[in-house]
Image (cartoon, rainbow, N blue to C red):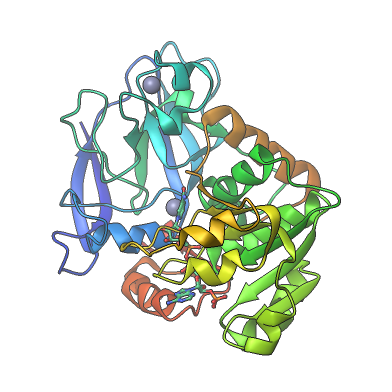
Amino acid sequence: MIKAKGYAAQSAKSPVSPWTFERREPGPHDVQIEILYCGVCHSDIHQVRDEWGGSIFPMVPGHEIVGRVTKTGDHVKKFKVGDLAGVGCLVDSCRVCDNCKDGLEQYCLNGMSGTYNGYEQDKKTPTYGGYSNVIVTNEDFVLHVSEKLPLENVAPLLCAGITTYSPLRHWKVGKGHKVGVLGLGGLGHMAVKFAVAFGSEVTMLSGSPSKEADAKKLGAHKFVLTSDKKSIDSVKGYFDFIIDTVSAPHDYNLFLSLLKTNGVHICVGAPPTPTEIMGFNLIMGRKSVAGSLIGGLPETQEMLDFCAEHNIVSDIELIAIKDIEKAYERMMKGDVRYRFVIDMATL
Ligand code: NAP
Ligand code: ZN
Ligand code: ZN
């Protein structure tokens, strides 16, 4: 076994703090990666605090992992020692169900293995995430990362990036579409960058007036303050799509009124409690509310390659791992510009 250092939550009530644990030695198809940076996703907060239920402790969070390959199993074909590598939100899946065969491993019908707060495919060995110095992952679930981009800014692409890229591609969002991005945090800022890159007209829908200038810098064409009635009224019936990245409960009915006929409200944000939707708000104008979970392995690689080609990365604030709880507190207040990334050298 490999001795790993990391930070873990021992329970939903305890802070994320230093912990040592073991990882498996790389098997024939495994890649061992020295983790250099790991992004901090709001899903880390939901899970360490057990807001979604069913959390597994001790929990080493982190699924926006980048680093360098330090060891490869005998049968590994895709990677060699010294290569840059990334690991996102999943580390395995059944590989035989219809969704896995279609490259939609995130929707594995037999249950994918989450990078943390989950189990390996044996359904009993817990998985531990990227707030640590090393990870061992089957090569099929490891991504190639370009040497051209600043590595710390690439880390958030592994979750925030693919989670917003995938629905925009699925719904073929592009030229001629008006897109609203709701919530300017980690996912929201990547949604703006991708929707702009795909040629859409993008409006930032934010509750934070202080983020207006940044939204424009990120490429948004318009800014609507969601707490201001006049501002909201100016976009009634306006959008083809809204990408909703908000982490806390909010009123979907209000945002349905901003959609055109046939408009789609795409939920990627995952608030821990349900919200009521009035049927009439869907019926009048044949509107839909949809959802999307991260992305499969082929699409994640496609997204990383697209980012390398178009020079797209995340805007980050690099932190020391000891400051992780402070980062969580700031995220809870919407105070993140626009992704915290842990510098693993501080571990
Ligand atoms: P984040 O960086 O904390 O950003 C969330 C943003 O939502 C905030 O910056 C804020 O934007 C807005 N917001 C927060 N609290 C709010 C409230 N009470 N009312 C209205 N707006 C509020 O979070 P993130 O990492 O982007 O994650 C966002 C959500 O997506 C989380 O629920 C996360 O679990 C989920 N997620 C889902 C997937 C998936 O596969 N579907 C993947 C990753 C994450 P403004 O200041 O602009 O209002
Ligand atoms: Zn995430
Ligand atoms: Zn499967």
- The answer to whether residue 125 shows anywhere in this view is yes
Image mark count: 0
Q: Is residue 183 left or right of residue 278?
A: right
Q: Is residue 44 left or right of residue 78?
A: left
Q: What residue is shown at x 41% (from left), y 48% (from top)?
A: 63
State which image quarter holds ligand 3: top left
From the top left corner, tell me how far across and down residue 174 is, in percent: 79, 47
Q: Is residue 32 above or below residue 221?
A: above
- The answer to whether residue 314 shows anywhere in this view is no
Q: Name the foreground residue: 58 vs 49.
A: 49
Q: Is residue 290 left or right of residue 277?
A: right
From the top left corner, tell me how far across and down residue 323 is, in percent: 36, 74
Quadrant including the C terminus: bottom left
Q: Name the foreground residue: 323 vs 81.
A: 323
From the top left corner, tell me how far across and down residue 22 is, in percent: 20, 39
Q: What residue is shown at x 19% (from left), y 56% (from top)?
A: 19
Quadrant including the N terminus: top left
Q: Is residue 296 above or below residue 213?
A: above
Q: What residue is shown at x 31% (from left), y 24% (from top)?
A: 110
Q: Quadrant of residue 143?
A: top right
From the top left corner, tell me how far across and down residue 87 is, in percent: 46, 39
Q: Is residue 16 left or right of residue 63?
A: left
Q: Name the foreground residue: 41 vs 53.
A: 53
